Image (tube, helix red, strand yellow):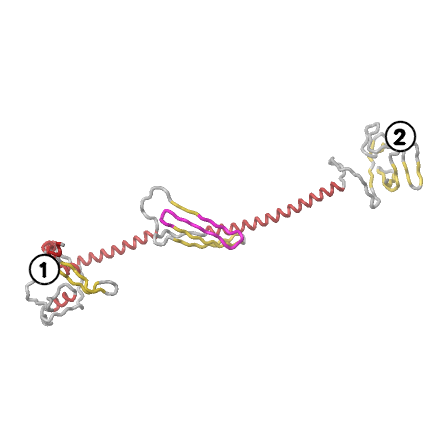
Amino acid sequence: MVRCTAKANANYVGLTEDVVLGEKNNDETFNSGRLTVQKDDKGNAITINKEDENGVGDGLVYRNEDGTVNKVDIYLDQGGTVIHNVAAGTADTDAVNVSQLNEAWDQINNNTTAITNIGNKVGELDSRIDEVGAGAAALAALHPLDFDPDDKWDFAAGYGNYRGENAVAIGAFYRPNEDTMFSVGGTVGNDDNMVNAGVSFKIGQGNGVSTSRVAMAKEIKDLRKELEAMKSAMLDVNAGRRLDTSKLQLFPDVPQNHWAYEYVATLAGNGVIEGYPDGNFDGARPMTRYEFAAMLYKAMLNGAKLSDKILTEFAPEIERFTVDVVHKDKDGNPTVERVRVVKRDDAAK
């Protein structure tokens, strides 16, 4: 039961009085402020939501004098009025009930929660992308040095930054040869640490020529040493090794006022010539071929250049000479040597 008031000159019914619709009997009553409509002025019961003879049935309607049909606007102006048992709307223009409204509201809340969770996941993903970017930048900063055949391990460290995130990387490289390299690296500094490992190698036919700058530098250095040694040997051969005039060996039978004193003392001091076992030089004594060959041999050891004729002439005697080391210094260099003639029987052995 609702309250209804029909206002003059208006196309709507206001609900202010109690109205009962739909009782099909012959009574028409109005009492105590209560209006009960049971039949129309033609004696027909009023029916709502039912088609009339003209096929009109869209709710409570009335006809104008010209025969047209208007819908009646019904509004509720009494606080606390509740309409019960409203069916769920199906068409686009149907009203919805509380159940449908609550269902829609729950769905909105669920969607809001899902959107919030997605936003949190996107923020977390964005942070992880920044950390991964910093780690990748740090790993990219690791580089091995050039191949060194004497030092095959290389170590490297790198730093990376990406959109406020920082990472540090360390790595190691091992090259057993010039054509193969093993590597391992990792990052520290954030929750998304990264690790990598790899191997690099060359395939195909090689030319045997090293492309390492370190190996080439070492080879050049060794070649320079060999070149210096060859230059020194050539200078010694061409000019002869200079005698150290401060080295003198005195003989009792060669006085200082003798014209050959300086020559004999300097040659003996530099090991070119020797005296006899009795300590004398005996300069007037004839020299044997062995003694002369010994002198030539010592001269050759000191870098003296000899003609091919002399070498051919004294080849048999020179072959029988040997130099024995009598004493060495702390570095192993000989300081005292002795020239010895090998007997024919010993040479044959």
Q: Position of residue 271 (x, y in %)?
A: 16, 64
User: Which residue is nearer to you in this view: 56 or 63?
Assistant: 56
Write down the residue under mark 1: 290
Q: Quadrant of residue 344?
A: bottom left
User: Which residue is nearer to you in this view: 47 or 290?
Assistant: 290
Amino acid type, label 1 = Tyr
Point out the stretch of residues depicted in magenta.
175-197
Q: Position of residue 321 (x, y in %)?
A: 13, 58
Please check the rendered image and state whether residue 176 is part of the magenta-colored stretch, yes or no. Answer: yes
Q: Earlier in the sequence, mark 1 or mark 2?
A: 2
Q: Are marks 1 and 2 in contact (CB under 8 Å)?
A: no
Circle 2 packing at 10 Å, graded few (<14), some (14-19), many (20+), is few
Name the residue: 12% across, 65% down: 274
Name the residue: 30% across, 55% down: 221
Q: How many marks?
A: 2
User: Which residue is nearer to you in this view: 347 or 261?
Assistant: 347
Q: Is residue 34 left or right of residue 162?
A: right
Q: Position of residue 27 (x, y in %)?
A: 93, 34
Circle 1 packing at 10 Å, graded few (<14), some (14-19), many (20+), is some
- Residue 211: numbered disc: none
Location of residue 95 with respect to 211 vertically, above or below = above
Q: Nearer the viewer, mark 1 or mark 2?
A: 1
Disc 1 is placed on an element classified as helix
Q: Quadrant of residue 241?
A: bottom left
Write down the residue under mark 2: 44
**Image quadrant occupied by the N terminus:** top right
Amino acid type, label 2 = Asn
**Disc 1/disc 2 C-alpha distance (Å):** 169 Å
